Each structure stands twice: as C-alpha cells, then as structure tokens.
Image: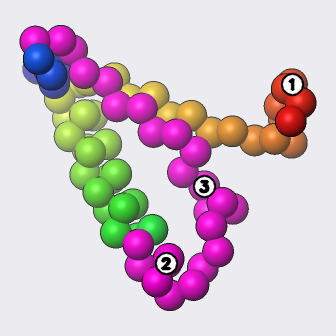
Amino acid sequence: MALEVEGRKAALVVVDVQNKFYTVSEGLYGSVNRHIGEMNRALDLFHESGSPVVLICYDPMNSNTSD
C-alpha cells in the first residue's frame, strides 16, 4: 500500500546526493554518513510500500542551462 500524508499519496524526492559537493573532514564525514543511513531507510520504506521515488542529480557538465 502506498504511503499517505494527510490522505494524499506520498512520494519521496531525493535531490543531488553526490560526493563532489562536500569535503571529507571528520565532522562532516560523520554527518554525511548519518544522513545517508536515514535516506536509505526512507528509500527502503518507500520502495517496500510501492510509493514513488524520484532521484534528481544535477550535473553541470551535461546541463543545457547556464549559471
């Protein structure tokens, strides 16, 4: 059964989870790893429920937009 929020079907949108946007210092590394674990649990929950998951990855090298 799809997940619902306030009676509406829910979708999970994950935006730009890429290693190239952070530097690996010990404090940041631990924070990123903690959040990745939480994201993985959310992804599992949505996949298991049959709810939509949208992954968005911005790659400026392959973009048709200018900065």
Asked if the stretch drawn in magenta spans residue 26, the answer is yes
Q: Are marks 1 and 3 in contact (CB under 8 Å)?
A: no
Q: Quadrant of residue 62?
A: top right
Q: Which residue is mark 2?
A: 29
Asked if residue 21 lies left or right of residue 45, the reply is: right
Instruction: Specify the label residue 18 is tagged with.
Output: 3
> What residue would you read off at disc 1?
64
Please tell me which residue is depicted at 57% across the width and 84% down the height of the picture. Answer: 25
View extreme (front): residue: 67
Report the number of discs.
Answer: 3
Q: Is residue 35 left or right of residue 1?
A: right
Q: Is residue 21 left or right of residue 9?
A: right
Instruction: Please provide the residue range marked out in magenta.
Output: 7-31
SS for callout 1: loop
**What is the spatial separation of the Cα atoms under label 1 and label 2, in whole angstroms?**
32 Å
Residue 41 spot, x, y in % from top left: 25, 51
Quadrant into which the N terminus falls? top left
50 relative to 20, above or below: above
Q: Is residue 25 magenta?
A: yes
- The local secondary structure at tag 2 comes to helix
Q: Quadrant of residue 30?
A: bottom left
